[in-house]
Amino acid sequence: MGFIGIDAGGTLVKLAYKSESNQIHTTYFLSSRFDLVKQWIENKFDHPKICMTGGRAKQLQNFLGTENYQYVVEFDATVRGVLYQLDKNHIDIQQAIVTNIGTGTSIHHLFETQHTRLGGTGIGGGTLMGLSKKMAGTMVFGEIVERSSMGSRKHIDVLVEDIYQENQLPIKGSLTASNFGALLHSEEEVNSDNDYLAGIQGMIGEVISSLSIQAADTKNVEDIIYIGTTLENNEMLQNVIASYTTLKNKRAVFLPEHGYSGAIGALLTI
Ligand SMILES: Nc1ncnc2c1ncn2[C@@H]1O[C@H](COP(=O)(O)OP(=O)(O)OP(=O)(O)O)[C@@H](O)[C@H]1O
Ligand SMILES: [Mg+2]
């Protein structure tokens, strides 16, 4: 026996499970390695109860050959996982924007336990991986995160103050006017690969926080909860997002189990 919640996403399969002491534990595998997921489950559990969610849930279920499983709609599971974490960490929020930065990004409005999808963007964790591969020759998430923090965006982006020279600034000068816009006039060799990585993280964080802030304005909401594995140990992305969000007088909330809200929610559905 045993209980497992599985969120099979576009890039990663996240698992949340209960130990004998009833504590929730988590682990993940690449979505391209269903074989490892199967092996892991078979090694650890005997006829477990499984609840699945995520875009690849059906695919994974077919691979596992499990007849006996539950399915829960992705955002129902995610919200359940978010509410669980808010409660566990004593964060009192009734209403918020929830932005899930997965392979792509999805933006929802949460009111108590109800949620509606407001929109999203194709700019997300997949963008980080794809552009990092092309621009800096790395596809290793941990390396991308580490190296981006050593890079500089000075000769990558155009800032508002770069354009408004000698004029009175209409908005804060340190805001980005154009992500990657500075590449047009800078010499190739000015920027290192780490600088490109920093620019990619900056662009992703700024697009996502800008959209989330607009969503928060529309719904008159102050709190924006950012989740998704793209944030995992990714201090730079969190910093970009937090500073944009704070600048617009909203509150950025990060949860300890960024990437596991869906899997935890699926587990709690059983
Ligand atoms: N070990 C890792 N391997 C690959 N990507 C990782 C890893 N750790 C973090 N990431 C980042 O997390 C992103 C995936 O996030 P997440 O698991 O939330 O998405 P997903 O659920 O697979 O996708 P979606 O919800 O869009 O279907 C990747 O695109 C990458 O940026
Ligand atoms: Mg997901």
Image: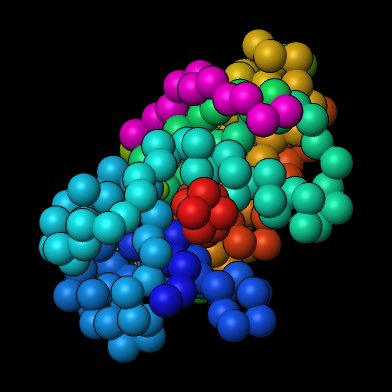
Q: Is residue 97 magenta?
A: no
Taking the spot 73% from the left edge, 41% from the top edge, the residue there is 252
Magenta residues (range)? 112-124
Position of the N terminus, as image quadrant, is: bottom left
Taking the spot 77% from the left edge, 57% from the top edge, the residue there is 88
- Looking at this view, is 183 or 151 the one in front? 151
| Magenta-drawn stretch, dominant element (helix, strand or loop) | strand
Q: In this view, does 75 lie above or below 20?
A: above
Quarter holding residue 61 = bottom left
- Percent position (x, y) of residue 3? 47, 68
Left of 245 or right of it: where is 162? left
Question: Does the image show residue 129?
Answer: no
| Residue situated furthest bottom in the rendering | 43
Q: In this view, does 249 lie above or below 11?
A: above
- Percent position (x, y) of residue 210? 58, 28
- Looking at this view, is 100 or 90 the one in front? 90
| Residue situated furthest top in the rendering | 218
- Percent position (x, y) of residue 232? 54, 64
> Which coloring applies here?
rainbow
Taking the spot 68% from the left edge, 44% from the top edge, the residue there is 83
Left of 210 or right of it: where is 136? left
Question: Does the image show residue 212?
Answer: yes
Q: Does the magenta stretch include residue 117?
A: yes
- Percent position (x, y) of residue 90? 85, 53
- Looking at this view, is 105 or 189 the one in front? 105
Taking the spot 40% from the left edge, 30% from the top edge, the residue there is 121
Q: Across the whole image, how many numbered discs are drawn on residues?
A: 0
